[in-house]
Amino acid sequence: MKIQYETSVVDAKKTWFPDRSSHPREPGAILISRRRCAMTNIVSQNRLSVHKQHEVLLKLEAAGLTDTLAQKLVDSRDNDLGTRVVRFIENGGIEPSVSQKMARSIMGKNFFGIEEAVKHFGVNPTRAQLVLLAEIPFTKAELKGKKDTHILVAVFPLSIIDVRGKMTAEVFYNQGWYNNQDFAKNRGDVGWYLIKKTPVDNSTNKTYQEQQALLSDKDETPTAQVMVYTIVGHYLNTNERLLENGYVRCSDLASDGYRVYVGIFDADGLDVDNWDDGYRYSNIGLASARKSNN
C-alpha cells in the first residue's frame, strides 16, 4: 500500500508497515560459582591450548620465523612487537597506508576504514581492492574541514540486501517491499566516500529538484547502497545513530519511478522507502557526498 502522507512520514512509518514481531531475549549465561570451574573458563578463554601453540609456532616457522626473530619478539619493550602482530591479525592482515593513517588521525570516530569493514561486515578484501583504497582521494584540508560533519568510509561492494542479511533484526525496520528492487541488490563499487552525517542544510520542505540546486559543484547525491552501508557501519562502529529523526533522498529510483530515501534510524531500525520527487516534507532532506579528487 502506498503511503499518502496525510500524516507525517514518521507516523506513516509506524502506521503503514506491520509491527515488528517481538523477539524474546535469550536467557543469560549461567554464572558458575565454583572457583575451579571459573578458573577453567578463564584459562580456556585467554590461553591457547598446547596443541594450538604448536600449530601457531609451525605456521610462524614456515613463514620464516627464526631464533633471532623470535628473540626480538621476546625482548620487545612492553611487548610492543607482539601487540602489533596481534593487531595485524585482527585487521585481517591489512597494514594501513600512510594516507589511510593520516585520514584516520584527522577524522577520529568519523572514520570507517578497511579494518572496520573487515570487523563489522566480514569483508575479505582482494588485493585489487586494497590497491584501489590505498590512497585517500581527499586532501588533508578537505578532511580537516569535514571531520565533524562527515564520515570518511571505505565502501565495499555490499548491497543493501547483503548488509541487511548480516545484521540482527533490530538494525533494519521490518519491511520487505524492496527485496527484489534493483537499487537494493546493487553492490556498487569499492571506494572512499566522504558522506555528510546530516541532510544538506535547508533541504527539507523542498522538491528533489529544489534540493539538487543546494548542492555545490563539489558535492553529489550518493546512492542508497552507499548511504545504508555508511549509516549501518557507523552505528556498528560507534553506536551513534545517524538520521534518527529524519530521512534523506538518495540518487536511486525504485521500479515505480519514485525516489528512494532512507532514515528514521530509531529503535525500530533503519527505514528504506520511496516517494514522488515533487512532494515537500518537513523531515525529508537530501543526502550529500563530497566528490573525490580522483
Image (cartoon, rainbow, N blue to C red):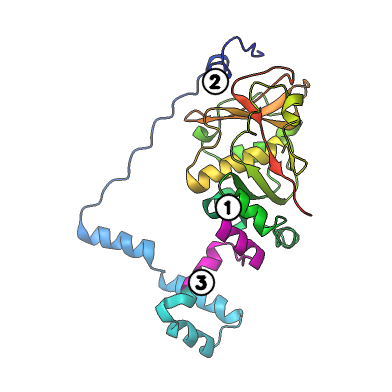
State the residue position of label 1: 111
Q: Is residue 90 left or right of residue 289?
A: left
Disc 3 marks which residue?
84
**Amino acid beneath label 1:** Phe
- The residue pinned by badge 2 equals 10
Q: Is residue 166 visible?
A: no
**Residue 8 on image: x %, y %:** 56, 15
Where on the picture, by quarter, is residue 294?
bottom right
Q: Is 33 left or right of 207, judged from the image as shown?
A: left
Amino acid at the residue labelled 3: Arg
Say what amino acid the circle numbered 2 marks: Val
Residue 183 spot, x, y in % from top left: 74, 33
Give how far across and how far down residue 225 sits, in percent.
69, 38
Report the mark closest to the observer, 3 or 1.
1
Disc nearer the start of the sequence (1/2): 2
The region drawn magenta spans 83-106
